[in-house]
Amino acid sequence: KHIIHDLAGEIAERRFDPCSVEGGAMDRDNAHYRAELIARGSADAGVHDPARESSDHQLQKQLDEQWSAIDAEMESEAERIVDEITAETEKLIDDQWPAVTAISEALLERDILTGIEVRQIIEGSRRTDR
């Protein structure tokens, strides 16, 4: 959910006006960071590295190489996660586009919307979209 949140704003902006997004790198970086945490959670589970505390240089070197490989694997997995969730988020924005535009129009009229108002707008956009 958090990764979708990080990506949705930029994706919606890009759909509305492809020239309006000047970067969004921070949102993608946040998404990537969260995906890395997910990847680390699965990759780090059960890994014990006693040589990190050892003075044995050769063993330390071997373990450093192994950790580098694990880091590269996690980086690759994080990118895969972000790419997959980006595609899901783009589909979500496309599917919910009438609600997104209705909410943005309401926000242009009033700067603040309550949760109840947002729900009403979403429900109204679903009825008119059918």
Image (cartoon, rainbow, N blue to C red):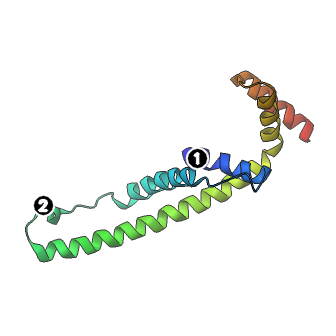
Quadrant of residue 58 within the rendered picture: bottom left
Q: Secondary structure at mark 2?
A: helix
Q: N-terminal of the two: label 2 or label 1?
A: 1
Query: Is 51 displayed left or right of 38 in the figure?
Result: left
Which residue is tagged 1?
6
Amino acid type at circle 2 is: Glu
Instruction: Pick whichever, 21 or 100, lies toward us.
Output: 21
Q: Indicate the amino acid at tag 1.
A: Asp
Q: Position of residue 38 (x, y in %)?
A: 45, 54
Looking at the rendered image, the disc whose residue lies closer to the viewer, 2 or 1, is: 1
Q: Quadrant of residue 52?
A: bottom left
Q: In percent of the image, x 32 and y 71: which residue is there?
A: 68
The foreground one among 22 and 101 is 22
User: Which quarter of the figure is the N terminus placed in?
Assistant: top right
- At a point 42% along the width and 53% down the height, the residue shown is 37
On the picture, is 130 further left or further right than 24? right
What residue is rendered at 44% in x and 65% in y? 75
Task: Give the residue number, with chain letter if any, for mark 2.
Answer: 53
Q: Tell me where residue 116 sits by quadrant.
A: top right
Q: Is residue 118 above or below residue 98?
A: above
Cα separation between marks 2 and 1: 37 Å
16 on left or right of 7: right
Residue 46 pos. (x, y %): 29, 59
